[in-house]
Each structure stands twice: as structure tokens, then as C-alpha cells.
Image (cartoon, helix red, strand yellow):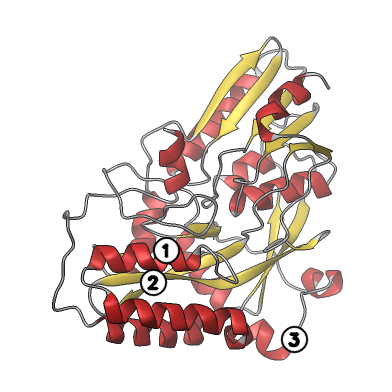
Amino acid sequence: MRNYFKTISILLAFVGSTLAVIWPECAVASDYQPPINHKLGIGTTFGRWPDGLVSPETNYAEVVAAINETMRAYHYDPAELDTPDYRRIEAAVTALAEVTTSDEAFIEGFRDIWKNGPFSHVAISTAQQPADALADYLDTMRIGGGGAVLTWQGDIAVLTVNTMMGLDTIEEINAAYAQIADRETDALIIDLRENGGGAFAIRPLVSHLLTKPVDAGGFISQRWNAEHHRGPNLAELAAVDPWEGWSIKAFWTDVQYDALTRVRFSPAEPVFEGPVYVLTSKRTASAAELATDVLKSSNRAVVIGENTAGQMLSQKIYDLPGGFHLSLPIADYYSAVNGRIEGVGVKPNIETDAANALDVALRQ
């Protein structure tokens, strides 16, 4: 179950995300695998692709050319594609195309190359349906339960959130807060140690802990980076109306069209006002990092564990020739308090090995 939620987590990145999208093998934000069964989540698992995937007629050089063209057309900052690190990746993928004999080998090789890529949220998968059709599915997707699980240590609630994806995960989070409100609860521990990200289950997770609206930060697109060579400041963020779509389909459209997309969380009933602790690991990624950051920076939670993954971008999927999908980052995220999270992560208030984080939280 733990590995399943990794898979299901990061593709969406913020949608996640940050964030990333359909056949995510999202360990922590960059590796995605084709699905195995029909459960889905944010890195999701849909139907099973045929074994073998041998496609002797696939023109891999054409696929690589389309990858490069698509990346340069839609990446949030094309200047990042003119660096030595990215050119190294391009050369490696071109070389892979020259020796690949099957789709499976191409997908595996691409993933291995991007494990050391200069930014996160890049993946290739086999296409089951056109990319444009995916957003509607993802907005109504259910992962089959277990996205969020509430347990108790005496009067301390422990809410383990394995993914930020799925309507049923949102329902489980809302139900958990209702149960917390119905009994004497001394503190809440939110366990994000195995959460690789997802989409909008982050909204109820954060909102039930707030007594007033909180600006989390903003996503910047290619339009922003065409005019600026920096992240947004607080005045620029405040000048933009908060984004209210809370839909993957709307988010993908708006975050590319708008130069700056402001993320704000508003309170939701019932509100838990007691002590909150968030557990993190190096596998906490994407939308789970956004949640960690906003709860820490608003002084609403104490973060315990390891520095998070630093994979906080928003990705979108595009069609490629040969029956492939390319996931690439279309927006970068800047915390209102802590700045860029990609490549940096969120530092815990109390640093300890992830395996010890729960014990440390219980002693607070």
C-alpha cells in the first residue's frame, strides 16, 4: 500500500502538484510508472498496459524531437533549458533513442536519465487516452480508499495522509476532522512522511486548521519568467486575486495563462485549534511540501522529521508521437514566506530521522 501511494502521488505535483499526471511513479516527484491496476490516486494507477510494449515501428528519434519541442514550448522557464545540465539530459535522451528497441526500454531509460535531472516533474508514460481528456477524469477520480487514515494515541489524533489525490481522500480528511471535533483531542499529528504529493486534498487538510485566511504563496508561469528573473514579492502576490478554481482542469488552464497564480487557504468547519505537528521525510514532496510549508510558515504547526524532497513544481501532460505522454513542469512555486521550494525543500522545526518523527511528536 505504501508503494502504491508513492506511485500515485507526484505526477500532478501540485496537481501538484505541484504535482503531475497520469502515470506517476512518484517516489517523490520525478519517477512515474505505467499503472498496474484500476486504483487511482494522484500519481495514479489506472488500467494495466499490455506487457512487453515492444514497438519496432516506433521512431524514437521523432519522439525525442517532439519531447524537446514540447519542453521548450511549455516549460515554465525556457532559460533553464539552456543550461549545461539540461543539455546533458537532452544528449542522453537522444543517445537512448538510438539504441532503444522497445517502448518499455525507452520509458525505463528516460526515467533513469531524469533521476539526475536539473528539475523535477518530468516523466514519460504510455498514453491510454488523449492528454486533453485526462483532466476531467482526474477531477472525479477516486483512489479506492486509504488516502487518509485517522488513528489515535490516547487523546492524540494521528492523521496519516498518503496522497493529496482523490475525491475519496478529500472525504476521508473531512471525516477525520469531524471525528476529531467530536471527542476530546489534545493534539493532532499529521503524518506526511510517505506523501509524494497530488492535488487538492491539500485544501481540507490545511483549511480545517485555520481561523483566518492564509496566503501560502504563488505559482509563476512562462509568462512571468518572460518578464522577470526572480520570484514574486509580497506586494506582487497581494495584487493578484486568490485563485478559486480548485479543479485540476481549471488549474492547468489558469496557471499557464496567468503570469502569477496566488494560492490562499480559507478556514473550513470544523476548525481544530489545538497543537499540530507535521511529520516529514525526504520523500515528502510536491503538494505535501506546500502543505508543510504553509502550516509551518503560518505558525500553525511544528514540523518534525527530515528536510522535504524539494520537488515543488506543477506539471501537465502532453501527447507525443508513438503513443506516449510527456509530463513536464508548467509552473514553479514560491512560498510567501520561504521563497522557492524546488531544489530546497522545507526544513523541519525539529530535525530527526523520519523513522523517529512520530515518537518525537508524541513526546512534545
Earlier in the chain: of badge 1 and badge 3, it is 1
Question: What residue is pinned by disc 1?
Answer: 111
| Rendered residue at 15%/71% (across/down) | 55
Give left or right: position of 195 versus 259.
Answer: left
Distance from disc 1 to disc 3, alpha carbons, whole Å, reads: 31 Å
Which three-letter amino acid code belongs to the residue tagged 1? Answer: Arg
Which three-letter amino acid code belongs to the residue tagged 3? Answer: His
Tags 1 and 3 touching, CB below 8 Å = no
- 339 over 93 or under it: above or below: above
Q: Where is residue 322 in the image (x, y as percent from the top left)?
A: 23, 76
* Mark 1 residue element: helix
Residue sitting nearer the eye, 27 or 276 = 27
Which three-letter amino acid code belongs to the residue tagged 2? Answer: Leu
Question: What residue is pinned by disc 3?
Answer: 228
Give left or right: position of 105 versus 289.
Answer: left
Question: What residue is pinned by disc 2?
Answer: 326
Q: Between tags 1 and 3, which lies in front?
A: 1
Earlier in the chain: of badge 3 and badge 2, it is 3
* Mark 3 residue element: loop
| Rendered residue at 60%/88% (across/down) | 82
Image quarter where the C terminus lies is: top right
Q: Between tags 3 and 2, which lies in front?
A: 2
Q: Position of residue 84 (x, y in %)?
A: 61, 84
- 62 over 132 or under it: above or below: below
